[in-house]
Amino acid sequence: MTEKQHTPKPDDRSDNAEKLQDMIDDTVENIEAANETMQFSSGEEKQNIAEKNKRREEAIQGFQAEIKDESGNQ
């Protein structure tokens, strides 16, 4: 038997910034939905939602930094 050579796909980063912006938009929507849910939640649930939203905010900052890096590399 012969082995097939697997060549990696070329690294196409042309739409990374756009994908990252979509991720930011989705995360902002999740934060807003969680804030609405928080109005009807009890103490521990509210705290869990607040902590998750904090992590979401940190993720947004990371996405923004990646967008900045991508724009510098193009």
Image (cartoon, rainbow, N blue to C red):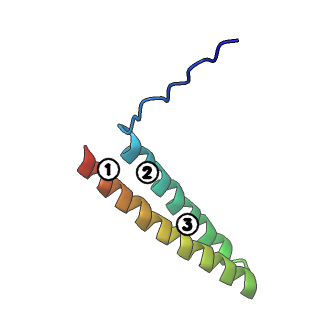
Question: How far across and how far down the image is residue 18, in percent?
Answer: 39, 44
- In the picture as drawn, the residue positioned furthest to the top comes out as 1
Nearest the viewer among 68 and 39 is 68
Q: Is residue 61 left or right of residue 68?
A: right
Say which residue label 1 marks.
Answer: 70
Question: Please, is residue 47 above or below residue 14 in the view?
Answer: below
Looking at the rendering, which quadrant does residue 41 occupy? bottom right
Query: Which disc number belongs to residue 32?
Result: 3
Q: Which residue is mark 2?
A: 20
Mark 3: which amino acid?
Answer: Glu
User: In the rendered structure, are the residues bearing label 2 and label 1 in contact, judged by CB atoms less than 8 Å apart?
Assistant: yes
Looking at the image, which residue is at 45% across and 64% down? 60
Q: Residues within 10 Å of mark 2 (few under 14, many from 20)?
A: some
Vertical relation: 51 (above or below) 32: below
Say what secondary structure mark 3 lies in: helix
Residue 38 in view of the camera: yes
Give the quarter of the figure containing the N terminus.
top right
Where does residue 12 sit, x and y in percent of width and height?
39, 34
Question: Crowdedness of circle 3 by 10 Å Cα count: few (<14), some, many (20+)?
Answer: few
Q: Amino acid at mark 1?
A: Glu
The Cα atoms of the two marked residues, 3 and 2, are separated by 19 Å
Residue 5: percent from left, percent from top = 56, 20
Between circles 3 and 2, the one closer to the viewer is 2
